[in-house]
Image: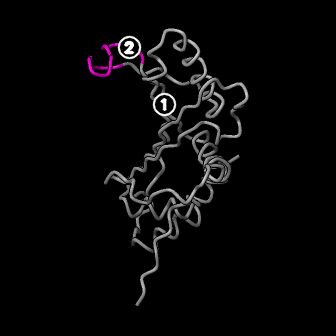
Amino acid sequence: MTPRMKEQFNGPVADQIKADFGVTNPMALPRLDRVVLMVGMGKQLEGTKLNAKAKEQVLSDLTVITGQKPVMTKAKKSVSNFKVRAGYENGVMVTLRGNRMWEFFDRLVSLSIPRIKDFRGLPSTNFDGRGNYSFGVTEQGIFPEVDMANAQFTHGMNITLVFKNSTDDISRAALAGLGMPFVREPEKKQ
């Protein structure tokens, strides 16, 4: 069964992009290629007691949120000011593709983002120049799958939506068509 957001992206959103940006070749349309979730755990890994518990909690939280096992990332360089040595585990990441990516994106837009406290919209300026969009959340409690009663500490995460064949304007239009809640631009008085 095709995910709901994928059908919407390939149907009305693709038609709107064709009309607005003059894309005639269907192979030149933008595609959401992958979604990457990253959690940096530098502060949690400093103490010896929190080390194992923090690592277990972040790994289990990301597994529950994404339905996929995360990977530990290691430091590439030693930085003495941050108490980091090369080869130390300092974060966790998950890359989602295919139907699992579309299901996660659907839950993110329709369930998780509306649960953010004092939410006024995501900034529409977080594009990187190649059409990829990144934003951060401050706590894992916005995802309904996470049991915050058993959580020992809160952690945030960075979420990156990676597009192919896209520019910032095309990606912004595609995400807005999929229901991404961007900050509304103030209307200019004439």
Q: Which mark is residue 83?
A: none
Residue at left offset 61%, top offset 47% = 108
Amino acid carrying label 2: it is Tyr
The picture places residue 47, in percent across and down from the top left corner, at 47, 13
Image quadrant in which you'd find residue 24:
bottom left
Q: Which mark is residue 39?
A: 1
Q: Which residues are magenta?
A: 75-89
The picture places residue 128, in percent across and down from the top left corner, at 34, 51
- Residue pointed to by mark 2: 88
Disc 2: CA contacts within 10 A as few (<14), some (14-19) or many (>=20): some
The picture places residue 3, in percent across and down from the top left corner, at 66, 49
Helix, strand or loop at mark 2: loop
- Is 74 displayed left or right of 56 in the figure? left
Q: How is the image coloured?
A: one colour
- Is 126 displayed left or right of 118 in the figure? left
Residue at left offset 55%, top offset 60% = 120
Disc 1: CA contacts within 10 A as few (<14), some (14-19) or many (>=20): many
